[in-house]
Amino acid sequence: MKALCYNGKYDLRVERVPDPEILNPRDAIIKVSKTAVCGSDLHLINGYIPTMKEGDIIGHEFMGEVVETGKGVTNLKKGDRVSVAATISCGHCNYCSTGSYSLCDNSNPNAFMPEKIMGDSPAAIFGYTHSFGGYAGGHAEYVRVPFADVGMFKVDERLTDEQAVFLGDAFPTGFMGADMAGIQPGDTVAVWGCGGVGQMAIQSAFLLGAERVIAIDREPSRLETARRVGRAETLDFSKVDVLEALREMTGGRGPDRCIDCVGLEAVDDSAQYYYDKAKQFLGLEIDRAIVLRQAIMACRKGGTVSILGVYAGFVDSVPMGAAMNKGLTFKMGQLHAQKYIPRLMEYVANGQADTSFLATHSLSLEEGMKGYDMFNKRTDDVMRVVFTP
């Protein structure tokens, strides 16, 4: 089959690889119909997250049609159109049983790798390094889905493929950020980053009762989408002092909830950015925590900082003194997709939320490197590229 494979930093190629096979009773094989890029894939391609190997198939947001199931998969059958959770979870360990699917104890066969630097192992993720399991990703014609009885969801007939493909990651990640923030009716929520996850965090904040959402980015098209689709107020961080603007917009108080949808590759024109960039280049720091620092300083006393943007390792200059003395609550993590997908599918089906606008560009799998280059450089007003294998 064809697959989009990692061949080193910023080098993706379509290659012929063996077709996947059923290895365990709870496996399924799906024929991929749509598969989307994600900002966290850029961290792999740009060389910030280790344990990638040449030939790895990337991609963790995909959907398709079931073509084969193991004997242990009884809730789905051949021919079903399914959305697949980006995280791989057993469904039965203590963490899965309490809804914390991305903390699954049993899905990562390479748990010893993250345990060395994190002290513990999160769940595996499709196509996302050998530290996260080494599973083949969804940028391919076919994918093996482990624990398919837990991680695959039959798609409601009312949803198009362009809507359903984002149920695997972008929508549940954005929703989880709003859910973790503990939004109360009347709250003002600030969202850093207006990419796919940020746009869905904006919609989710309103679904959960926010009175106002203030979206922060510098890409004009993404800010316009946040206003038009998300009904958010917007700030262009290249034109305003974000902290001063947020204070002014909230009567000097600060947002009640702050959601970081950016993570380790944050950019701006500050001296702190160049400091972080230099330390990254020298291997002295992994993450550029520009947004995290801003969120801590901006959040009102007693508020919540919810972190969705991926951080990979060690950061410095985080104002923990401010966080402690302001009594902030921190919530963060990879998405618990299996927990949210059924609820979010219903939101899309009944028109309370939309995901289709995220798919601004549709390309073939052979155009994979072109799609990621466009996504990385934010050209042609790209939000997300969707590949059809």
Image (spheres, helix red, strand yellow):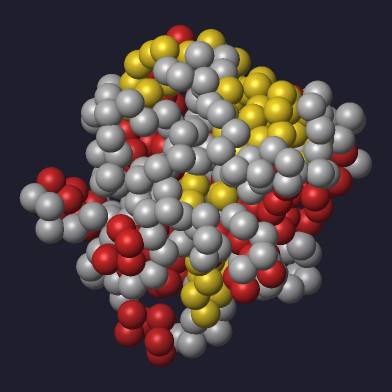
Q: How many marks?
A: 0
Q: Position of residue 283 (x, y in %)?
A: 12, 52
Residue 216 seen from this side = no
Residue at position x 52%, y 61% in the image? 106
> For residue 89, what is the image quadrant?
bottom right
Q: Which residue occupies the foreground of this view, 115 or 11? A: 115
Q: Is residue 107 left or right of residue 184?
A: left
Q: Above or below — where is 363 with respect to 88?
A: above
Q: Above or below — where is 260 with respect to 327?
A: above
Q: Is residue 195 left or right of residue 68?
A: left
Q: Which residue occupies the foreground of this view, 346 or 355? A: 346
Q: Is residue 373 left or right of residue 54?
A: right
Residue at position x 37%, y 23% in the image? 5
Q: Position of residue 330 (x, y in %)?
A: 49, 75
Q: Position of residue 22 (x, y in %)?
A: 60, 34
Q: Position of residue 58 (x, y in %)?
A: 43, 32
Q: Above or below — where is 191 with respect to 382?
A: below
Q: Above or below — where is 9 with respect to 344?
A: above
Q: Which residue occupies the foreground of this view, 23 or 254? A: 23
Q: Residue furthest left?
A: 282
Q: Is residue 358 left or right of residue 382?
A: right
Q: Quadrant of the C terminus?
A: top right
Residue at position x 52%, y 79% in the image? 329
Residue at position x 49%, y 81% in the image? 328
Residue 16 seen from this side = yes
